[in-house]
Amino acid sequence: MKFHVNRDVFSEAVSFVVKLLPQRNPQPILAGVLIEAGEDGLSLSAFDYEASARTTIEATIDDPGTILVHGRLLSEIASRLPNAPIQIEVDDDGGILLSCGSARFTLSSMPVQEYPAIPEVTGDSGLVPGEDFATAIAQVAFAASRDDVTPVLTGVQLEVSGTHLSLVATDRYRVALREIPWDGSGSASDEATTALVPARTLTEVGKTFSHSGDISIAFSGSGDREIIAFTAGNKTVTSLLIKGNFPPVRRLFPEQTEHHAVVNTAELAEAVRRVALVLDRSAPLRFTFTTDAVSMDASGTEQARATESVDANLVGEDVTLGLNPQYLLEALGAVKSEFARITFTSSDNANKLSPVLITPQTSVDRAGEESFRYLLQPNLLLR
């Protein structure tokens, strides 16, 4: 095998395919990148049984073939090579020779025959705008749980229904939901489709495909090997779906939204960051909403205290409650609008605190599109 390839193109391709691989893999063979040189160009793939990444780039193929080489090492080498074409070939002893300008590397090859087959996706598919999809992932994925004890909560639920794709995530204390347009013209079924995708994988997909135009999303497989594939241009990422029943969190969103406050998103976020400096990591921040302001009061364990208020427009009775400041800040960062509406919901259970609903607000008087909604459970205040 022997080929020549542009250094920048090759470096970007290797970086893309190794990005989803875990830092430490229990099976050394899965740390490899599969490089296939053939008539269609140069194909690079990586796979760890849960996620895969594949891309095809242009190259001058002198001698077709397939090699498997340690991915992260190759990525580090490729990113530091001089600005010159790369030549890679296999010597008579099976070693991999890489040359670029005056730089020379000899790398050990890994056994190609032991590498697992990259999954192929042949199921129904649809299209979503790349920028909208990346924004939606950023607005939702942070609300997924980071605790592997409950695997279903570590994922983002994708729900296709009609002309919309919904992304939903929860960690029991909050729920984030975003809807974007879905073009399912390639799908043969009108039934709703769901897929529970690991939040970590989906986050990388959003970063990778944020400027890629339309993204094709395809569902495939059955039983324990259900997978989803994201394709844009010459790049494809697949992910094994999380098995289990995602909690029915949509029913938690209220229908009535009369009791609410409208605040400037940036002003509230800046104030929360300042006041929360004196709080313990897990302590709630006290918020008091009145007719024209929201005040924050934080008492720390080292005799420290902070208070601040910002303008607000309250409709309804005054409200005092405790909120996790970090969870609130993440919601405000996801709103993506100048103003945010904080709605105070009601519950039939008098002994249970009702969540607050956070949505975008175009201006003080005009609500924004409710394509993004965020529910946050208040904390019990001890004083």
Image (spheres, rainbow, N blue to C red):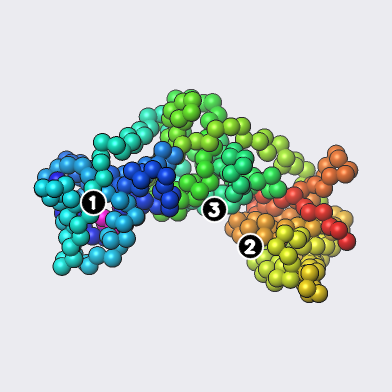
Residue 345, image x, y percentages: 79, 47
Q: Are marks 1 and 3 in contact (CB under 8 Å)?
A: no
Does the magenta run of residues contain 10? yes
Mostly what secondary structure, the magenta segment? helix
Does the magenta run of residues contain 188? no
Of the two numbered discs 3 and 2 in the rendering, the one whose residue sits closer to the viewer? 3
At 56% from the left and 42% from the top, the residue drawn is: 155
At 16% from the left and 66% from the top, the residue drawn is: 101
Q: Which residue is disc 2 drawn over?
A: 338
The residue type indicated by label 3 comes to: Ala
The residue type indicated by label 1 comes to: Ser
The range drawn in magenta is 9-13
Q: CA distance from mark 3 to mark 2?
A: 18 Å
Q: Which residue is disc 1 drawn over?
A: 108
Residue 84, image x, y percentages: 18, 64
| Residue nearest the viewer, comparing 365 with 68 | 68
| Residue nearest the viewer, comparing 199 with 135 | 199
At 53% from the left and 46% from the top, the residue drawn is: 199
Question: Residue 325: which disc?
Answer: none
Where disc 1 sits, the SS reads loop
Residue 202, image x, y percentages: 49, 46
Please tell me in which quadrant of the rendered image residue 86 appears. Answer: bottom left
Q: CA distance from mark 1 to mark 2?
A: 54 Å
Q: CA distance from mark 1 to mark 3?
A: 39 Å
Q: Which residue is disc 3 drawn over?
A: 138
- Figure check: 370 above or below 113: below
The residue type indicated by label 2 comes to: Glu
In-image side of 347 versus 338 (left or right): right
- Quadrant for the C terminus, please: bottom right
The reply to whether residue 282 is visible in this rendering is yes
Which numbered disc flags the more N-terminal residue, 3 or 2?
A: 3
